[in-house]
Amino acid sequence: MSSKKPVVVYGASGYTGRLVCEFLRHYKIPFTAAGRNAAKLEEVMKSVPGIETADYDVVQVDNTEESLTELLEGRKVVCNVVGPFERYGEPVVRAALNTGCHYIDTTGEPAYANKMIEKYSQAFKEKGISMCPYTAYMYVPAEICARTIMDQDPTIDNLEVATAGNFLPTHASVQSIFSLFSHDAQYLKDNEMVNWPAGRGYEVNVPGWITTQLVHPWGGGFLPTVFKDHPTVHTCKQYSGNADRATMEMAIEMQKDFEANVRTLATEEERQAAIDARVESVEYFLPPRENPLENRSVDMAVGIGSAGGLRAVLQSTTPYTMTGLFQAATAAMLAKGGTQKPGFASACEAVGHNYLLAQLKNFVPAKLTITDI
């Protein structure tokens, strides 16, 4: 039997990676903190709360399939938090497949995830392991809401979900936005994937605010992909937002600039150079640790059938902290109990939405409200 730690956190020195490590400590799961700079990893890990009680080691690794395959040999789960995923993600997916290791990540880049699903899902399924992208706060709570109301009302065939919260995007999140803009955002309409109009926001009513909140398709989200082959759901739209309207307005203006000044360039090389320039212009920053009295999240799902439906609202706190929790909770279940769905799966499909909701309630305030509509 391998003496290696069962879980690898690839990108552990980043803001989200540290949170994953913190929650793996809570679950008492031995892990390896991996990344491209061992000295930085060693220094960063010292700042993780309670790390002195964790069973972990640090490994330096290059972002190549060969190096990552060597790292993942004998492991059970890799938590990939290195973005932009369109640039750095595929070698991790291939290494996980090579070694029979469950793969989960925090991506919010639908084009990347869809490419990985198309290329590797069947191979993961044949090996009995799961590939779970989008295991993060912008996706898991909304899916918990959607699946909860679907459990209660099997006639639901039309879903709309939205996420809105108070949070400061990380440096990696800001960089990833250019990957989103490079591809058409899509939603599921009558069993067909169709394009959202670019550079447009939408107003939604979010519990906790008197004024409406500005949201965005954000690359199309994840749930349209999850439900596109569902036997009963034929329509699914997903919106994401930040409760700070100025942040959302800036993101929409960035997309308008992209459409006007990048997408119109003549060659792929010119477009990539323009994207690289915009990515490199984002100065590195590390957000402060979240404050549960300020950083809150509201996730919603509305599901309807021919005779009405249900609305679920999940109110909670500290969105990025929730990402660390969902990553660790999913990794813990996969490492100890295996998966409920090999191949491509959402975290809710792989380990169960009721399990993830229970883990959320174990660690942070969380209120789930179901109402008729």
Image: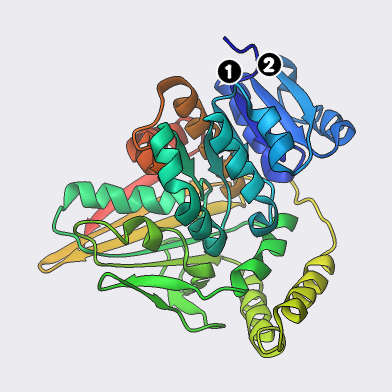
Three-letter code for the amino acid on which mark 2 is drawn: Asp
Is 211 displayed left or right of 233 in the figure? right
| The N terminus sits in image quarter | top right
Residue 28: mark: 1
Q: Are marks 2 and 1 in contact (CB under 8 Å)?
A: yes
How far separated are the C-alphas under marks 2 and 1? Answer: 8 Å
Say how many tags the image has. 2
Is 166 displayed left or right of 48 in the figure? left
The crowd level at tag 1 (other Cα within 10 Å; few <14, some 14-19, many 20+) is few
Q: Secondary structure at mark 2?
A: loop
The crowd level at tag 2 (other Cα within 10 Å; few <14, some 14-19, many 20+) is some
Give 48 or 275, whichever is nearer the viewer: 275
Residue at (37% x, 33% y) in the render: 355
Q: Is residue 43 above or below residue 371?
A: above
Q: Position of residue 332 (x, y in %)?
A: 50, 26
Whether residue 169 is visible, yes or no, is no
Residue 55: mark: 2
Give 109 or 112, whichever is nearer the viewer: 112
Residue 174 placement: quadrant: bottom right
Residue at (53% x, 69% y) in the render: 219
Whether residue 70 is visible, yes or no, is yes
Three-letter code for the amino acid on which mark 1 is drawn: Lys
Is 295 displayed left or right of 12 in the figure? left
| The C terminus sits in image quarter | bottom left
Q: How is the image coloured?
A: rainbow
Residue at (48% x, 84% y) in the render: 197
Q: Secondary structure at mark 1?
A: loop
Residue 61 placement: quadrant: top right
Q: Is residue 4 above or below residue 210?
A: above
